């Protein structure tokens, strides 16, 4: 007779505390509903929680909404950044304010449904220090999905993201990972990449992705391009190596071309002075040199920022009850 295999007990969610970090940007109409639904989820599950709302330089009345929420609830903290620094800087400010054993980051527009939070928590309690939400179907324009695929490709090359792992801004981080991210000195934080760098057991879990409840996404083509450049120049030497390889290739071709003309001059007399060839070669070589110097200059500037920056953002006001 076969012995009965004992059923695996569900993880005890109540043994831990949780912080939810929500960057807020021009979401006056929907951020209140987002927070209310987050609170409902944690209250219904009888969990200890904190909600950190970071106003990232909104131009509407978002700050007034979240400041009022913070004054009325002891579970809510609101931070007002001096200006718009970007989503990753706002997330970093929220991570540094958070106190939970686990920290969840999510968007302010209800595209990350709060009722999916428990799925992240349960997966993390299986022993993972980082868990990303894998969207069943991402509700986003085509260029956003294309941008996500490009960033995913870069993540795999730069941060060694496993091929079977999906990443997103809807994620849960163990306190150890949060402390490593907060302690890293970089002028260009990229929370997804840093989470991959500073974790030892990343995972993902299937979650729902709803249509945006109000307005349009603030993450346009310009921001996606900026994020791609930030990843490449701040966390990778790939552009430098690619430029160096191109420079060596052009130099090699120029050397062979010069050798050809040198050998040819021994056997064939030419009445043409060759100024066209020289002009073309100088233009090409000078262009490559300028490209390489620009690339090196980009790295020098970013290195200087990383070494000299104490903080990459400034909080103008903090509200809590």
Image (cartoon, grey):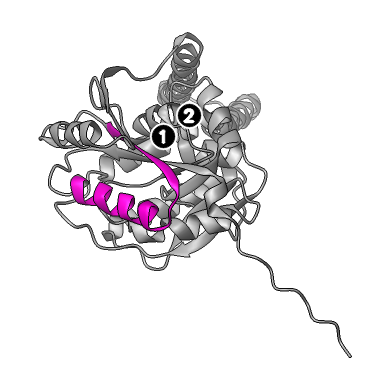
Residue furthest out toward the top: 308
Say left or right for 318 vs 265: left
Q: Quadrant of residue 142?
A: bottom left
Residue at 27% in and 39% down? 222
Residue at 56% in and 58% down? 123
Per the rendered image, the range of residues in magenta is 32-54
Query: Label 1 belongs to which residue?
Result: 229
Q: Secondary structure at mark 2?
A: helix
Q: CA distance from mark 2 to mark 1?
A: 6 Å
Query: Label 2 belongs to which residue?
Result: 233
Expressed as whole percent of the image width and height from the top left, the position of residue 188 reads 43, 26
Q: Which mark is residue 128?
A: none
**Which of 293/49 is in front?**
49
Please tell me whether residue 207 is drawn above or below residue 310 in the rendered image: below
Q: Quadrant of residue 280?
A: top left
**Which of 256/122 is in front?**
122
User: Is residue 153 in view?
Assistant: yes
């Amino acid at each position: 007779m076969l012995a009965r295999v004992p059923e695996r007990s569900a993880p005890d969610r109540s043994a831990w505390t949780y912080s939810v970090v929500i960057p807020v940007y021009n979401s006056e109409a929907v951020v209140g509903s987002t927070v209310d639904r987050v609170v409902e989820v944690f209250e219904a599950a009888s969990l200890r929680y904190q909600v950190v709302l970071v106003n990232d330089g909104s131009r509407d009345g978002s700050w007034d909404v979240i400041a009022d929420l913070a004054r009325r609830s002891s579970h809510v903290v609101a931070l007002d950044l001096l200006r718009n620094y970007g989503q990753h800087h706002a997330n970093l400010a929220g991570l540094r304010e958070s106190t939970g054993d686990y920290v969840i980051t999510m968007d302010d527009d209800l595209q990350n449904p709060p009722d999916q939070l428990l799925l992240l928590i349960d997966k993390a309690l299986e022993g993972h220090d980082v868990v990303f939400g894998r969207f069943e179907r991402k509700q986003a324009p085509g260029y956003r999905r294309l941008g996500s695929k490009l960033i995913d490709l870069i993540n795999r090359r730069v941060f060694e993201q496993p091929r079977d792992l999906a990443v997103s801004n809807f994620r849960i981080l163990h306190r150890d990972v949060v402390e490593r991210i907060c302690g890293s000195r970089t002028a260009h934080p990229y929370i997804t990449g840093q989470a991959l760098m500073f974790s030892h057991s990343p995972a993902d879990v299937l979650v729902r992705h709803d249509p945006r409840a109000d307005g349009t996404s603030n993450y346009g083509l310009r921001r996606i391009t900026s994020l791609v450049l930030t990843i490449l120049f701040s966390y990778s030497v790939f552009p430098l190596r690619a430029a160096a390889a191109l420079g060596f290739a052009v130099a090699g071709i120029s050397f062979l071309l010069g050798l050809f003309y040198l050998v040819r001059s021994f056997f064939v007399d030419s009445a043409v002075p060759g100024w066209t060839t020289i002009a073309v070669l100088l233009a090409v070589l000078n262009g490559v040199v300028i490209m390489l110097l620009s690339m090196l200059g980009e790295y020098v500037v970013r290195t200087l920022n990383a070494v000299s920056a104490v903080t990459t953002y400034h909080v103008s006001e903090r509200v809590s009850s």
